[in-house]
Amino acid sequence: MARYILTRLLSLLISLTVASAVIFALIEIIPGDPAAFMLGINAQDDTIAALRAELGLDTSPLERYFGWVSGMVTGDFGTSYTYRTPISEMIAERLWISLPLALIALALSTLIAFPVGILAASKRGSLTDTIVMGFTQLGVAIPNFWFAMLMVLVFAINLRWFSAGGFPGWDEGLFTGLKALTLPAISLALPQASILARVMRSALVDTLDEDFMRTARAKGLNRRQAIQRHALRNAMIPVLTIIGLQFSFLLAGAIIIENVFFLPGLGRLVFQAISQRDLIVVESVVMLLVFAVIVVNFAVDIAYVLVDPRLRRQG
């Protein structure tokens, strides 16, 4: 077990190192000069050179890379070119919106997908299975931004149960903040729930055909008891994989939903930084999101060992 965890930690560190180098290199090869972009087309060469020196852009790429990485290790992401504000403060402010949104959406997705997938697997081949899989296929096919706009039209404009967008801030109260995140979370959760339900059904269907399930039934367990006590745990490996990937997507890939609902989250911050050519913000936020994805994958690997004792024996 300890050897397995150490191996995964080493893989995590290597992945972070490679990711940081790739992100920095991609930002470096983007054409254009941030200093010239900030000053406009009529700026003088000496003015641009002075701003480049102030922003630290006149040093070599290698110096900037190691300065950026060492700063991130200590929690210093640098200063925004556009807002002249510490990037760590900007990220912390936006993270308190993106992270709860991702967690709520993941919780809704899991709560919907598990019973739906179990129902479809236990009724496989029946009309219920066909109907459930038809709805999940529809959920996969519908773009989440179209579904988000539909929810705004129904629940915000027509019924007036929720606001059409924006975030009042957590200072206004927990209920007010959660209410503002409800429609975005549902818009993110339903397509992901459809995917997770289909994976759950497929994993359970494969497990239900195993010999140990027939043995459990022969010992007197009914179908529901056999699924709850034996099938679910053995079907969790692919399900945990999808849950880990979904959380990474919900945290890093919610930029469209954040723009639909005008949420000042990390996705919207990256979008604004790209449009303003604030490259240090782009690379810092992207690196943070990559770090979150890699850490989540590491946690999923550890969850595999906790769920499947065969992996513990192999470790």
Image (cartoon, grey):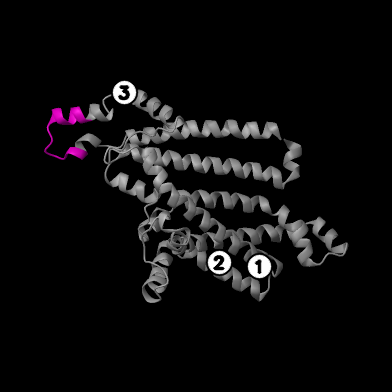
Q: Which residues are magenta?
A: 38-51
Task: State how far apart marks 3 and 2 are (Cα).
Answer: 52 Å
Check the image and report above or below for 244 versus 56.
Answer: below
Identify the residue at image location x=50%, y=62%. Answer: 191
Q: Are marks 3 and 2 in contact (CB under 8 Å)?
A: no
Which image quarter holds the N terminus?
A: top right
Q: Position of residue 166 (x, y in %)?
A: 36, 60
Q: Earlier in the sequence, mark 3 or mark 2?
A: 3
Magenta segment includes 72: no
> In this view of the protein, which residue sits in the foreground, 83 or 215?
83
Which residue is label 3 attached to? 60
Callout 2: 10 Å neighbours few (<14), some, many (20+)?
many
Q: Position of residue 252 (x, y in %)?
A: 45, 48
* Circle 3: residue type: Ser
Q: Are marks 1 and 2 in contact (CB under 8 Å)?
A: yes
Identify the residue at image location x=56%, y=58%. Answer: 107
Which residue is label 2 attached to? 136
Which residue is label 1 attached to? 120
Q: Earlier in the sequence, mark 1 or mark 3?
A: 3
Task: State how far apart marks 1 and 2 are (Cα).
Answer: 11 Å
Compared across the picture, whether 32 is left or right of 149 comes to left
* Circle 1: residue type: Ala
Task: State how far apart marks 1 and 3 are (Cα).
Answer: 59 Å
